[in-house]
Amino acid sequence: MALSESIEYDKIEVVGEYATVQVREATVIKKDGKELTRSFHRYVLEIGTLDASDNLVDTDISSQPAKVQAICNAVWTDSLKSSYKAFLIANKTSE
């Protein structure tokens, strides 16, 4: 009886005006090569955040799987980053 566990990134979606990347991570447990169970975890990646000086700080995607990084790098263009930065500045709340 051999049990194995693997992680699959089985759904990666780009949604919205500012190309939010939604990732579904599946944890798969198999016994002797036959799938016993599959559970899911979802998370969202946005282009970045503003720092105290209103500079856009890119989201660190270095720990993401290669295919997630490739999608983020393809859709998060410099012009989209500029547009997202302007959106964030326009919608800042006073603290």
Image: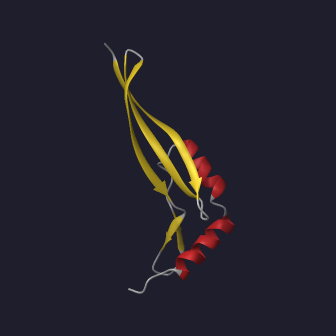
User: Residue shown at 48%/81% (left/top)?
Assistant: 92
The picture quadrant where one finds residue 83 is bottom right
Query: Which residue extends farthest bottom?
Result: 94
Identify the image quadrant of the C terminus. Answer: bottom left
Query: Which residue extends farthest right?
Result: 79
What scheme was used to colour the molecule? secondary structure
User: Residue shown at 47%/48% (left/top)?
Assistant: 63
On the image, the x and y values in percent for residue 60 come to 49, 58
Residue 45's place in the image compared with 1, above or below, is: below
Judged left or right of residue 5, residue 53 is: right
On the image, the x and y values in percent for residue 44 come to 47, 55
Judged left or right of residue 70, residue 32 is: left
Residue 67's place in the image compared with 31, above or below, is: below
User: Residue shown at 43%/37% (left/top)?
Assistant: 26
Judged left or right of residue 73, residue 27 is: left
On the image, the x and y values in percent for residue 66 come to 56, 43
The picture quadrant where one finds residue 75 is bottom right
